[in-house]
Amino acid sequence: KIAKDILKEWNDKKMSEDFRITLFNIILRKSNLKAIQLEDEMNLPIHIQLPSLKKEDQVSEKKNE
């Protein structure tokens, strides 16, 4: 049932924020891992720390601390 709901949202181009953030983090993690593999093969320095997305309220809480 969850998969059907996600597929329906995907087709309507309307996804929940939690799902979208999770999906983007998976894409970023996989692409950055591939970049690290290529950098290792070509003896290049590792590019950057692996990025991840967070909800705005989580970011504001960290800034206020």
Image (tube, rainbow, N blue to C red):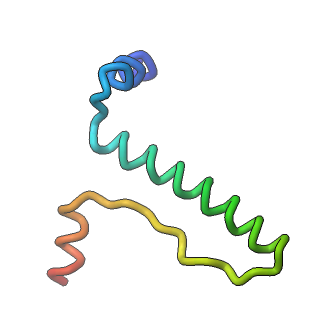
Count of numbered circles on the image = 0
Q: Is residue 57 above or below residue 13?
A: below
Task: Please indicate whether residue 32 sits to the left or right of residue 39 in the image.
Answer: left
Image spot of residue 7 (x, y percent): 42, 20
Q: Residue at x 53, y 49 (%)?
A: 27
Task: Please indicate whether residue 29 sits to the left or right of residue 63 in the image.
Answer: right
Q: Is residue 34 above or below residue 42?
A: above
Q: Residue at x 37, y 49 (%)?
A: 21
Tell which of 53 and 48 is nearer to you. 48
Q: In the rendered image, which quarter is residue 20 located in? A: top left
Image spot of residue 35 (x, y percent): 68, 64
Tell which of 28 and 6 is nearer to you. 28
Q: Residue at x 47, y 67 (%)?
A: 51
Q: Quadrant of the C terminus?
A: bottom left
Q: In the rendered image, which quarter is residue 63 located in? A: bottom left
Q: Is residue 44 above or below residue 36?
A: below
Q: Is residue 48 above or below residue 13?
A: below
